[in-house]
Image: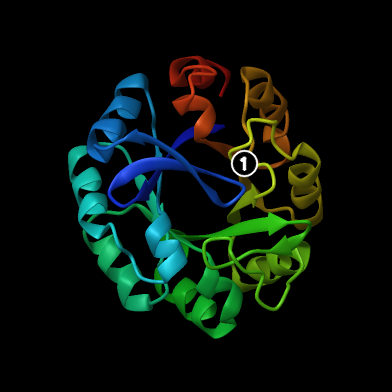
Amino acid sequence: MLIIPAIDLKDGCVVRFVQGRLDKKVYSRDPVKTAKHWIKQGAKLLHVVDLDGAMSGTIKNLDLVKEIVSNVDVPVQFGGGVRKLETIKALVGFGVWRVVLGTRAVEDKVFLQKAFKLFKNKIIVSIDAKDNNLLIKGWRSSGKAKDVLAFAHALKKIGFKELIYTDTLKDGTLKGPNIKGVKNLLKETGMKIIASGGMSSLDDIHKLKSLEKQGLTGVIIGKALYEGKFTLTQALKLG
């Protein structure tokens, strides 16, 4: 099971959100330094999100993303504001290992099908859930409310084998992940899942680790690492 540090970018800084609302604390004004720090501690994959892009629909921290990619020697998956096929192509072109799709994937099935046909495993869809409904546009809207499970099945039908699942009510709260939701998604879809949201302790990692045989492939961790609830090194020993 991969332990994946999150680097959330807003206005050029590393920040964290709580349930989709900005936690005003800035953890770093040097995202590249932050990326190098996680690599030094043993990270094998980084999860980078452009929060400005997720809200506006256009990537705002592209230069920083390029800088991170060129300064680390591990894969970087990136999302936030990716709404065009040309954008995916450009990101992959300068070294992003995998592009995370959200809003456009939920809103436009034809786009999603084209994206999968062109990029296959170079893209992954993030299911951002609130009370079993999908959130879009930086978690500020549910749009035409869609059921999480139904959307996951639609992804599988297109050909996706893995997805990211975030319980937005848990994200940034340090109250533990939605184990029940993860278990249900694994059982009902048979897909591989990367879990995100609510990580608070090494015990949470231990609980998620027990779902590895069912298809859990990784866990994205943000605030717990930045707040020093445990170190990445400690987490990696459990992963």
Q: Secondary structure at mark 1?
A: loop
Query: Which residue is drawn at the image coordinates 59% and 55% (left, top)?
Result: 163
Q: Would you call the spot at circle 1 few (<14 residues within 10 Å), some (14-19), or many (20 or more)?
A: many
- Please indicate whether residue 7 sits to the left or right of residue 194 in the image: left
Report which residue position mark 1 lands on.
197
Expressed as whole percent of the image width and height from the top left, the position of residue 168 reads 65, 50
Expressed as whole percent of the image width and height from the top left, the position of residue 116 reads 49, 72
Q: Does residue 79 appear in the picture of this structure?
A: no
> What type is the residue that disc 1 sits on?
Gly
- Identify the image quadrant of the N terminus: top right
Quadrant location of residue 211? top right
Q: Is 42 located above or below residue 147 in the figure? A: above
Quadrant location of residue 13? top left
Query: Which residue is drawn at the image coordinates 31% and 28% (left, top)?
Result: 39
Q: How is the image coloured?
A: rainbow
Q: Is 136 located above or below residue 32 in the figure? A: below
Query: Which residue is drawn at the image coordinates 40% and 38% (left, top)?
Result: 45
Query: Which residue is drawn at the image coordinates 31% and 52% (left, top)?
Result: 11
- Please indicate whether residue 170 sits to the left or right of residue 85 in the image: right
Expressed as whole percent of the image width and height from the top left, the position of residue 33 reads 24, 32
Expressed as whole percent of the image width and height from the top left, the position of residue 115 reads 45, 75
- Front-most of residues 87 and 167: 167
The single residue placed furthest to the front in the displayed view is: 24
- Identify the image quadrant of the C terminus: top right
Q: How many marks?
A: 1
- Front-most of residues 214 and 99: 99
Quadrant location of residue 194? top right
Q: Is 43 located above or below residue 216 in the figure? A: above
Q: Does residue 84 appear in the picture of this structure?
A: yes
- Front-most of residues 162 and 23: 23
